[in-house]
Amino acid sequence: MALGKYSRVDGRKSSSYCSTITVVVFVGVCLFGVWMLMTSSVVPTQNSDFSSQEAKTELKQKVTENNPNQFEDNPGDLPDDAVKEEGSLKNDQGKSNTGENTVEETQEEKFVEENSEGKTETEGETKEAENDVEGNKDKLKSNSNEESNSGDGDSNSESGEATKEGGETNSSEQSESEENLSEKKSDTEENADETKHEDEVDGQTEEKIEQNQDKDSEERSGENKMEGQAKNQDTNDMFPAGVQSEILNETTTQNGPWSTQAAESENEKEAQKVVLSTDENEYKWKVCNVTAGPDYIPCLDNEEAIRKLPSRSHYEHRERHCPDEAPTCLVALPEGYRQPIKWPKSREQIWYYNVPHPKLAEVKGHQNWVKVTGEHLTFPGGGTQFKNGALHYIDSIQKSLPQIDWGKRSRVILDVGCGVASFGGYLFDRDVLAMSFAPKDEHEAQVQFALERGIPAISAVMGTKRLPFPSKVFDVVHCARCRVPWHTEGGKLLLELNRVLRPGGYFVWSATPVYRKVPEDVGIWKAMSELTKSMCWDLVVIEKDELNEVGAAIYRKPTSNECYEKRQNNEPPLCNESDDPDAVWNVLLQACINKVPVGTSERGFQWPEQWPLRAEKAPYWLKSSQVGVYGKAAPEDFSSDYEHWKHVVSKSYLTGLGINWSSVRNVMDMRAVYGGFAAALKDLKVWVMNVVPVDSSDTLPIIYERGLFGMYHDWCQSFSTYPRSYDLLHADHLFSHIKKRCKLVAVVAEIDRILRPEGHLIVRDKVEIIGVIERLAKSMQWKIRLTYSKDNEGLLCVQKTFWRPTETETIKSAIA
């Protein structure tokens, strides 16, 4: 660095003049501190237009969510106007250069602008401010060769440090407290004297990544300044120069009314006492000793609760019964488990020892569900209703009803009683996304087979409670011999499908009563005909599949309430006006019909845009008068979120985290908002389960409207999936959102349960949260692929290993 021309302040200035300058700076710092304390009382604008699923469930009607922490959980943006914190995450590579002098940051002509933006003032900034006041022109000239400055002075300096592959992490909270302001006053005076009386030391400048208006220049500059840290790292694993600043720039699309750090500090300190507990710093893991062994699903294998059920007639024993305390042990691996076969080959075969359950092959092998072939389980693509292949069956439905228009008009479907999900697996060839579900029952591990094959599925049952999906979201609902008694108890279960089916959507019922004439089937067909007629469903066509020797009845849900109003008998009855069809979390089923929307701006009045346009365009029913999750008008909020995630995915996730995306198939966004992360991945051969926590803003209908899918969930409980289901989990400010009501150790144990060995977890959250999750990941012998922090915001990428503890912990509730 060319510091030879650097002009220091010498003794030619009078001591009184220097004292005056010191006083000026001192007063400036005091005024800045007073300003910060005054702004701590500012309350951010509240999001009043998206209620949470938790609130809906409690009230069972539409309510306005009033969440004072709404905007504390930002969308994952690492602010580009921050300065280096003392507790930033350290670079492991940089530790090899400890012999070199550490260097201090320099700031040029930014003192006023940075303080007016509420930035933390560093000692280096104080020095530079004094030199600016004294008109030190020579310094600006010499430093112009080292740092890029925009002519208008509006570009923000950026700093941050990244670690790769096992880098140690030290996190600390940025503080804006009154005590620190007092320390800064004394530091300012001392630094003023040092600036006047000490020679400048060569090389005493901290490495920094400066954002320029020209991106190419920015990347070249970043590469030069990170050269000492990154030049020896493997190209595929390193965090590319310039990507840090790409991440920091994400806030340019998020300008919501955020609260200040000072306003958050007191509550945050109390919260950290819980977060940074001894248990989480020094946790000793054990393997779960349970009857289900490697297939343990805590909320579905609660044997203690199941034994106490008064009845099982409505499949209550297949519903969720979560233990009082979420497990904190790790699920064992099956003996002989190995890395799953990649998609699309996995659709046809999987490793036998990954899901070592041959019973289904014995029972359903003749129907081409699954067969045991050496060290593999193979899937010929058949099913009970399509023994000769799912694709022929799918195309025969299209041929009999062209309006179904797979992949364009019909994009998101629900497959009830899916078996091994071959129907959903082959719908990918038609650009259709299927949410498949089946109970954890005597059809041993059917959903686990589906997930191992790379096909979306969850363990669920049509029992006594509503499905975990909003109303009016599925374009098609499909049932092929799903063994559900639709016609009994006033059609309660079929009415639940009516709730989730979009007005104008189709119900495809492929079952023996459609085409067989035995007395039992004839009786069921008669009952179904009467029920569907009373529900105002039109029987559009009865499809005949000659090759598979089956048939399917295809019904269409009405798009108006005219038929309901003309019925002579109000059976099934219309639901009460107070009933909220979108309130689903632990809500009992009701045998009633919800009216279809009639207002032109209501959700469900119009059919969505065709795929893929619907993924990018804000839904017509999002109004500019509504406030979005991040504080903008809802349509603008939606668009900004999408641009934000496209930027993050393309500029850092795909190239900067060392993830081999060719081995990624099953992805989960653990705290999806608008589904922007999933939409940004739509051109990859992956599918994303978008989870909207029950205490977050209810944006799941928006996700479905854009041709994606997901479900509600409470992360204080286990997810309804088998162990080792997902290749990649994404948690955007999830942990800071749930830390006050969920035990983080239990949540991390659940993440370990559903993530495959060699799978990745990406966390974006506050620095102190990143530190906790990193320590827990290390305690499980996970590989730390990347840590990065900036202005109390952090990014963490970790990779699960095959490690399991040697000690065991017996979970009494899970012992049969």
Image (cartoon, helix red, strand yellow):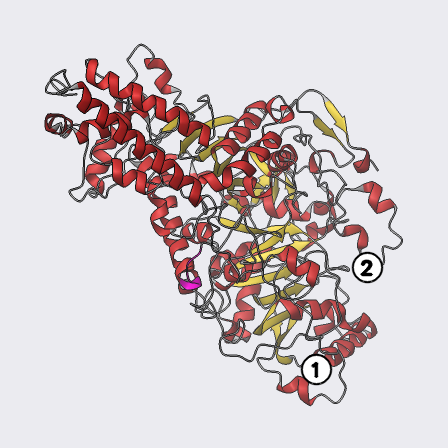
Identify the residue shown where x is 75% and y is 26%: 809
The magenta-colored residue range is 631-635
Give the amino acid at mark 2.
His
Identify the residue shown where x is 74% and y is 38%: 325
Identify the residue shown where x is 35% and y is 14%: 96
Residue 186 is left or right of residue 148, and the answer is: right
Please tell me the numbered disc located at residue 314. 2
Based on the displayed image, in which of its 4 quarters is residue 794 positioned?
top left
Q: Earlier in the sequence, mark 2 or mark 1?
A: 2
Q: Label 2, label 1: how many angstroms apart (C-alpha)?
A: 25 Å
Q: Secondary structure at mark 1?
A: helix
Image mark count: 2
Instruction: Give whichever of 69, 232 is nearer the camera.
Output: 69
Pick the quarter of the image with the N terminus: top left
Give above or below for 627 relative to 221. Answer: below
User: Per the image, is 362 magenta?
Assistant: no
Instruction: Give whichever of 605, 740 is nearer the camera.
Output: 740
Please tell me the numbered disc located at residue 533. 1
- Residue 401 appears at what percent x and percent y? 54, 75
